[in-house]
C-alpha cells in the first residue's frame, strides 16, 4: 500500500529576522553573559539556533486561519475563557488521546507553565519547607524554588546503556523528610526525553502520597511522542487523590509558546481557590482561539510532525554513529530535544554551550544548564527542517573532532 501524500511541509526554511524571536535575539543574557566574546569560526549572524524549545516550523494553517478569523472582529479588548467550547475541546483531546476524563471544575489557566509553577510553589510551600525534583532537570524548577525561597532536594536519575531511570530508593529516603512537601515532576522528562512507564509513575506517585506530598506533574511535552511511544497522565493513575496537579499546553505541541496560555488542573478545592484569587483571568483573545483550533483541528498536522521528527532523530543517530562513535545517544521516546553525551571528547569540565557557539556557530544548551547530574551532555533542538539539522550537525561534528580532547 502506498503512503498517502503529506498535507503539510516541514522542510521550508523560515526567516525569523525582525520577529523578536528569542532563538535569534535572546541567547545573550540567557545562554551567556551579555558581553561574552563569541567570536570564533562563525559570525553571530550565521549562528544556527538549536537551543530554546520552540520549533522552526510554521504552525498548522488551521490554527492560523482561526486566528485570522478572530482578527476579522475589530475588537481585541479584555478577554477570558467564557465560551465552554474551549475547555470542552481540551477535555475531548485528553479523552481521545489518553483515555483520561478530566474534571472541568478542576481546570484553571495560566500565562504559561512556568508562571503557574512559581505561583503554586508559593501557595503550597512555607519558607522552611522543601521541594523534591529529579536531575538533570528543567532549570526553571530550581528557579521556582529560589524565587520562593524554598530549599531544593535533588535525586539523580540513573543512566544505564543510554536509558534513564529514577532511583526510587533515593527518592523514598528524601521524600520521607517531613519538610519535603512538594514534588515537581517532568513527564515526559526534559531533557532526557524519557516517557515514564505506568509502573514508574505508580511508584513515584505512591511515594509522594504516602508522605503527604503534593505533586506537580509538568506534562507540557506529552503530545510530542515518537511514533512507537504512548503516554499516561500521572493523575489518571490516581483518580481518588486531590494532591496531583497537572500542567499541559499547546505551546510545545503546536509551536504556540509565544501565545502564553496553558491549562492547569488543580483538584484540591482550597488550593484552586487560592490560585484563582492570585490569578488575573484575562487571556490574549488570539491565544484562546489558537488553542481551541489546535485541539479540534490539529490532529493531522501533529501526526505528520511526529513522522518528520522521527526522521530527524534517526538521522542524528546515524550521523553520530558514523562520525562521533564515542558520543552516547539513544533516540528519546518523546519531545523534539535530543540529549547527547559527548563527554568522551571533552574529558574535563568544559562550558559546552560556549564551545559550540565559538567553534561551530551553533547555539545549544550544555549539561551545566540542567541543575545537576548532566556533565558532558548537550541538548539539541531537532524541531527544524532537515537541511538546517544537517548543517548544524555537520558543524558540531567538525568542531568536536577538531577541538575535542584538547
Image: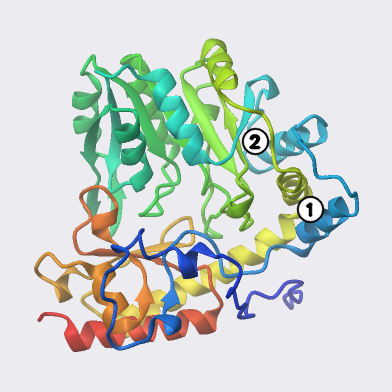
- In the image, is residue 400 above or below residue 220? below
**325, above or below 196, in the image:** below
Disc 1, SS: helix
Q: What percent of the width, then of the height, locates residue 309?
A: 54, 68
Horizontal side of 101 relative to 218 (left or right) equals: right
Tell me residue 3's x, y (percent).
Answer: 72, 75
The spot of residue 60 in percent (x, y) is 73, 62
> Could you tell which of marks 1 and 2 lies nearer the N-terminus?
2
Task: Looking at this view, name the residue that lies furthest to the top.
Answer: 270
Q: Which color scheme did the rendering employ for the protein?
A: rainbow
Instruction: Kindly report the distance in space between the C-alpha atoms of the residues bearing marks 1 and 2.
Output: 19 Å
Residue 215 circle label: none
In the rendered image, which residue does mark 2 sit on?
A: 99
Mark in the foreground, 1 or 2: 1
**Marking on residue 297:** 1
Which quadrant would residue 197 be assigned to in this image? Answer: top left
For disc 2, the neighbor class at 10 Å (few under 14, some 14 to 19, many from 20) is few
Residue 42: image quadrant is bottom left
204 and 293: which is toward the camera? 293
Mark 1 surroundings within 10 Å by alpha-carbon count, few (fewer than 14), some (14 through 19), many (20 or more): some
Identified at 44% across, 42% down, the residue is 187
Tell me: residue 4, above or below residue 87.
below
- Residue 347 lies left or right of residue 161; in this view the side is left
The N terminus: image quadrant:
bottom right
Image height check: is 253 above or below 184? Answer: below
- At horizontal 48% and vertical 59% (from top left) the residue drawn is 53
Q: Nearer the viewer, residue 78 or 155?
A: 78
Q: Is 102 or 262 nearer to us in this picture?
A: 262
Q: Residue at x 17, y 81 (%)?
A: 404
Amino acid at each position: 500500500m502506498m503512503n498517502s501524500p503529506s498535507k503539510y511541509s516541514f522542510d521550508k526554511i523560515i526567516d525569523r529576522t525582525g520577529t523578536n524571536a528569542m532563538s535569534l535575539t535572546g541567547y545573550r543574557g540567557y545562554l551567556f553573559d551579555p558581553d561574552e566574546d563569541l567570536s570564533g569560526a562563525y559570525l553571530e549572524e550565521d549562528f544556527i539556533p538549536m537551543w530554546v524549545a520552540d520549533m522552526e516550523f510554521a504552525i498548522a494553517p488551521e490554527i492560523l486561519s482561526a486566528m485570522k478569523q478572530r482578527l476579522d472582529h475589530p475588537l481585541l479588548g479584555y478577554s477570558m475563557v467564557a465560551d465552554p467550547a474551549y475547555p470542552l475541546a481540551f477535555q475531548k483531546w485528553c479523552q481521545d488521546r489518553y483515555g483520561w476524563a478530566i474534571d472541568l471544575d478542576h481546570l484553571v489557566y495560566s500565562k504559561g507553565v512556568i508562571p503557574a509553577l512559581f505561583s503554586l510553589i508559593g501557595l503550597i510551600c512555607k519558607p522552611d519547607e522543601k521541594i523534591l525534583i529529579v536531575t538533570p532537570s528543567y532549570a526553571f524548577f530550581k528557579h521556582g524554588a529560589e524565587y520562593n525561597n524554598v530549599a531544593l532536594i535533588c535525586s539523580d536519575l540513573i543512566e544505564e546503556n543510554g536509558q534513564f531511570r529514577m532511583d526510587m530508593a533515593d527518592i523514598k529516603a528524601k521524600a520521607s523528610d517531613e519538610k519535603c512537601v512538594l514534588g515537581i515532576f517532568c513527564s515526559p522528562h526534559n531533557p532526557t526525553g524519557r516517557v515514564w512507564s505506568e509502573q514508574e509513575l505508580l511508584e513515584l506517585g505512591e511515594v509522594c502520597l504516602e508522605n503527604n506530598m503534593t505533586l506537580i506533574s509538568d506534562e507540557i511535552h506529552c503530545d510530542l511522542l515518537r511514533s512507537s511511544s504512548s503516554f499516561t497522565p500521572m493523575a489518571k493513575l490516581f483518580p481518588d487523590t486531590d494532591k496531583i496537579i497537572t500542567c499541559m499546553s499547546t505551546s510545545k505541541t503546536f509551536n504556540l509558546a509565544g501565545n502564553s496560555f496553558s491549562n492547569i488542573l488543580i483538584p484540591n478545592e482550597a488550593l484552586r481557590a487560592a490560585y484563582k484569587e492570585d490569578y488575573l483571568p484575562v487571556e490574549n483573545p488570539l491565544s484562546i482561539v489558537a488553542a481551541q483550533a489546535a485541539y479540534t483541528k490539529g490532529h493531522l498536522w501533529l501526526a505528520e510532525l511526529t513522522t518528520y521528527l522521527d526522521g530527524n532523530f534517526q538521522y542524528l543517530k546515524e550521523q553520530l554513529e558514523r562520525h562521533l562513535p564515542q558520543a552516547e545517544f539513544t533516540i528519546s521516546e518523546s519531545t523534539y530535544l535530543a540529549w547527547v553525551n559527548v563527554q568522551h571528547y571533552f574529558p574535563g569540565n568544559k562550558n559546552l554551550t560556549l564551545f559550540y557557539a565559538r567553534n561551530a556557530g551553533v547555539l545549544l544548551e550544555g549539561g551545566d544548564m540542567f541543575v545537576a547530574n548532566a556533565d558532558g551532555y548537550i541538548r539539541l533542538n531537532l524541531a527544524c527542517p532537515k537541511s538546517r539539522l544537517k548543517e548544524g550537525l555537520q558543524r558540531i561534528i567538525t568542531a568536536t573532532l577538531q577541538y575535542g580532547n584538547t
